[in-house]
């Protein structure tokens, strides 16, 4: 189970300034007075009480509590002052067309160059309106670089005003002591300075469409005293006096950060909100728990086996090529002894078959050559399966008897009998004139004639 850590920068101006430096090469020096507020939660537990510490101490606390980055994920909450929401109408529903047209559709609603913003979209409304949420790319890239520098797993970046609890048909307002946060839909909200709250609130009530049934105002008691609450109620009452919706006030016995963290944790759990800025090109990569299995010895054994087996195959192939080359040379030498008039030898077997075909055609004077060709083919086949099994030593021909006399050196008597059997299968009559063992081989003389003669 992965734990969840929620964090926000106390002084976001320092965070914005720091993000502008993160694009440079090398690590960034984090100021000692850069403070964060953070809390944590398990997926099935409540959010812990928040604490405010320097960023360096925040890093140490995380490393002491979780020894590996796969054990937790971080959600960074950023002020809505550094983000914006808008609505555009784009006829096409194809993602590629929306991505191409979106910057041009909102450039009039953004004071800066729209190319400097990272834009995400929500679900298209029934009337065709497409909600858009934007944040400067520099803030996203700088935050990722900062957290990566300290090996902190940043999973999400969320605008705080869209993290407010809200029910269907309601708008939610939250006063955190510095800003007024307004959320009117899942991906539509606003954050404004408290000093500008009365003017902006009047404009919001006048120009925002789809008026709610209930305007729910959330008072976090840790930030507001009774006088400030009364002033806020007066401002709201003055702006909604003629509106056709109710106003309800909820008092929260915690700070705004705790309220937002509780809602995000309970409402979304392990799911990523639609308004998470870490999507598209900035999507966070998943982290996998390292395997407890020690695979290095097995990998070494497999590598050793592969190398050894490859060397064995190369050695065997080399030996077989050497033997094949030697056998081919011996075959050509024997063929030259049988047919000295053939100057060019290309394919011994094929040329031998041609000589046999000449004999079978019935041409006169070819008896000797045909017998010799048939005997030579059998010697060639025998030596292919067993190198140097039969070695011819002398050949003669008795024209009167029609006998081919063949002196041979054979590996053993078994090979001699196999050779005689193959000759008989080729319709040749074979007679053993003599056969005797000579050292480690057998010396034999055969008389061979055609059975058809």
Image (cartoon, rainbow, N blue to C red):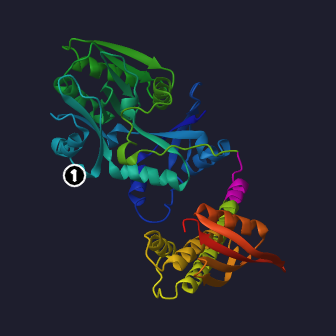
Q: Quadrant of the N terminus?
A: top right
From the viewer's side, name the closer residue of 192 and 24. Answer: 24
Locate residue 129, reporting x and y percent: 19, 29
Residue 297 painted magenta: yes
Please identify the quarter of the rendering in which residue 93 is found: top left
Locate residue 8, reporting x and y percent: 47, 40
- On the image, numbered disc 1 is attached to which residue? 113
Q: Residue at x 44, y 71 (%)?
A: 362
From the viewer's side, name the closer residue of 378 and 104. Answer: 378
Position of 420 with respect to 441 (left or right) is: left
Tag 1's secondary structure? Answer: loop
Q: On screen, 110 above or below 93?
A: below
Please identify the quarter of the rendering in which residue 354 is found: bottom left
- The residue segment tinted magenta is 293-302
From the viewer's side, name the closer residue of 268 and 107. Answer: 268
- Name the main secondary structure of what is drawn in magenta: helix
From the viewer's side, name the closer residue of 25 and 358. Answer: 358
């Amino acid at each position: 189970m992965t734990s969840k850590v929620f964090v926000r920068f106390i002084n976001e101006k320092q965070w914005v300034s720091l993000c502008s430096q993160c694009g440079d090469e090398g690590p960034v020096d984090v100021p000692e007075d850069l403070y964060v507020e953070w809390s944590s939660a398990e997926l099935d537990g409540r959010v812990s009480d928040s604490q405010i510490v320097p960023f360096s101490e925040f890093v140490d606390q995380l490393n002491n509590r979780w020894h590996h980055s796969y054990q937790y994920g971080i959600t960074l909450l950023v002020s809505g002052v550094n983000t914006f929401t808008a609505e555009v109408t784009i006829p096409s529903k194809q993602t590629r067309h929306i991505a191409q047209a979106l910057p041009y559709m909102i450039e009039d609603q953004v004071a800066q160059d729209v190319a400097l913003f990272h834009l995400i979209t929500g679900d298209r409304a029934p009337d065709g309106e497409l909600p858009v949420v934007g944040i400067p790319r520099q803030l996203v890239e700088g935050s990722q670089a900062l957290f990566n520098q300290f090996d902190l797993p940043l999973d999400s970046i969320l605008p705080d005003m869209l993290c407010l609890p809200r029910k269907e048909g309601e708008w939610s307002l939250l006063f955190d002591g510095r800003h007024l946060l307004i959320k009117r839909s899942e991906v539509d909200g606003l954050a404004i300075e408290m000093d500008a709250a009365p003017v902006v609130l009047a404009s919001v009530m006048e120009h925002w469409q789809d008026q709610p049934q209930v305007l729910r105002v959330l008072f976090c008691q840790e930030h507001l005293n009774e006088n400030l609450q009364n002033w806020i109620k007066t401002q709201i009452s003055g702006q909604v006096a003629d509106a056709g919706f109710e106003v309800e006030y909820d008092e929260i016995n915690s700070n705004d950060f705790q309220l937002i963290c509780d809602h995000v944790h309970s409402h979304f759990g392990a799911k990523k909100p639609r308004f998470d800025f870490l999507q598209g090109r900035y999507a966070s990569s998943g982290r996998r728990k390292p395997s407890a299995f020690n695979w290095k010895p097995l990998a070494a054994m497999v590598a050793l086996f592969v190398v050894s087996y490859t060397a064995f195959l190369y050695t065997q192939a080399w030996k077989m090529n050497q033997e094949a080359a030697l056998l081919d040379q011996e075959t050509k030498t024997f063929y030259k002894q049988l047919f000295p008039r053939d100057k060019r030898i290309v394919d011994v077997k094929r040329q031998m078959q041609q000589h046999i075909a000449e004999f079978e055609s019935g041409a006169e004077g070819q008896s000797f050559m045909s017998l010799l060709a048939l005997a030579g083919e059998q010697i060639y086949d025998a030596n292919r399966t067993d190198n140097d099994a039969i070695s011819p030593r002398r050949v003669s021909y008795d024209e009167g008897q029609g006998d081919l006399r063949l002196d041979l050196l054979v590996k053993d008597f078994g090979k001699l009998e196999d050779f005689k059997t193959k000759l008989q299968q080729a319709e040749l009559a074979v007679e053993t004139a003599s056969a005797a063992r000579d050292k480690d081989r057998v010396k034999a003389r055969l008389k061979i004639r055609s059975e058809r003669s």
